[in-house]
Image: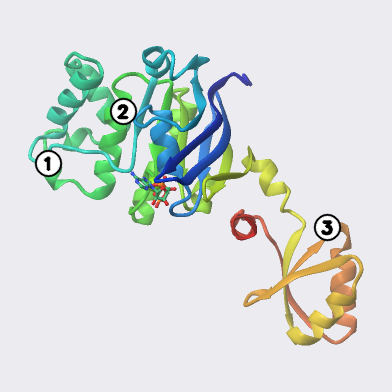
Amino acid sequence: MSSEIVLRTIGLGKSYRGRRVVQDLNLEVRRGDVFGFLGPNGAGKSTTIRMILSLITPLTGSVEIFGQDLHRNRERALASVAGIVEKPDFYLYLSAVRNMQIAGSLTLRRTPKKEKIDVCLGLVGLSDRAGDRVKTYSHGMKQRLGIAQALLCDPELIILDEPTNGLDPQGMKEVRELVHHLATEKGITVFLSSHLLNEVEQVATRMAIINKGNLIVQGSVDELLRSNANTVVVNVTPQKKALLLLQKMRSASVVETAEQGIRVEIDQKRIPAMVAALVESGCQVHAVIPEKSLERYFLSMTEQS
Ligand SMILES: Nc1ncnc2c1ncn2[C@@H]1O[C@H](COP(=O)(O)OP(=O)(O)OP(=O)(O)O)[C@@H](O)[C@H]1O
Ligand SMILES: [Mg+2]
């Protein structure tokens, strides 16, 4: 695997009316990544993406794309990049093909060939609706049309700001599959933002979490998941009795009690002994569920900061 860095932000920061909304942000996106840029509402995702796409000027720091400094070499840095911030805009009374022609002539400064438009619409699964007015498109179809437009310039890096926002589960799945296809079959590096963890977990190879403009953590999704692997939820009754017992155990540490059970940090090898101790003291253990989702991780990270 190549570890070429295709996008780097160095100490990137932005303020609005004296208020810091992005602070000292250092991101590293490598070729072939599906990079999930995760953060709750207002975390600074769109602002960061706007700086990366050179739509707004950073207050501090810099952006390098394919080794080119964005400020000094804007054209070259952005030559192989396409992006959508917040939501794509269309001429609703024109067809998808006509929208593609217009979008193409703006980004490529010439009207794209019909074959090229067909290929891009095919990639996002819109071939059979290509002649219909965009007005008649569903939200998910519009998102995919936006991605088709972004693909017109054969980008090596594509930046998508919350591409699944507002979609139903089926629409989300389609966008995820499309992103996966672009990365694995077309070799396009994808940077996408989201406020949904399981979304990022399902599609991204690497991720960064930001909150209130600050980077909380960055790394491979697998590694970040594994760093959480020692947490289990113990579904046990009576819960109060079990809690007292678990709190006394030296091999386990209780994180919290929740509806589904007691969340415990424990070495995998010690789980049988913990279960045995609970059973011996008269508790009933219904389930011990390893916590794989980044959900807790995300929540605890964003709560801590
Ligand atoms: N043009 C602007 N003027 C003033 N404040 C702004 C502007 N754009 C963004 N902000 C503020 O900057 C902060 C970060 O906003 P941003 O849109 O980057 O967050 P986000 O992570 O994209 O959130 P969301 O998930 O809601 O899209 C917010 O507090 C927002 O109110
Ligand atoms: Mg946003």
**Kind of residue indicated by mark 1:** Leu
Density class for disc 3 (Cα within 10 Å; few <14, some 14-19, many ≥20) is: few
Establish if 166 lies above or below 145.
Answer: below
For label 3, being within 8 Å of ligand 1 is answered: no
User: Would you name the residue on which mark 1 appears?
Assistant: 92
Q: Which numbered disc, 3 or 1, marks the residue that appears first in the sequence?
A: 1
Give me the C-alpha separation between circle 3 and circle 2: 46 Å
Task: From the viewer's side, name the closer residue of 212 and 297.
Answer: 212
Density class for disc 2 (Cα within 10 Å; few <14, some 14-19, many ≥20) is: many
Give me the C-alpha separation between circle 3 and circle 1: 56 Å
Residue 197 appears left or right of 236: left
Q: Is residue 222 visible?
A: yes
Total marks in image: 3
User: Would you name the residue on which mark 2 appears?
Assistant: 150
Helix, strand or loop for disc 2: helix
Mark seen at residue 130: none
Residue at (64% x, 74% y) in the render: 260
Residue 269 appears left or right of 123: right
**Kind of residue indicated by mark 3:** Gln
To which quarter of the image does residue 289 belong?
A: bottom right
Residue at (46% x, 38% y) in the render: 14
**Kind of residue indicated by mark 2:** Ala
Residue at (26% x, 29% y) in the render: 149
User: Would you name the residue on which mark 3 appears?
Assistant: 268
Q: Position of residue 109 (x, y in %)?
A: 21, 14
To which quarter of the image does residue 134 belong?
A: top left
Q: Which numbered disc, 3 or 2, marks the residue that appears first in the sequence?
A: 2
Give me the C-alpha separation between circle 2 and circle 1: 18 Å
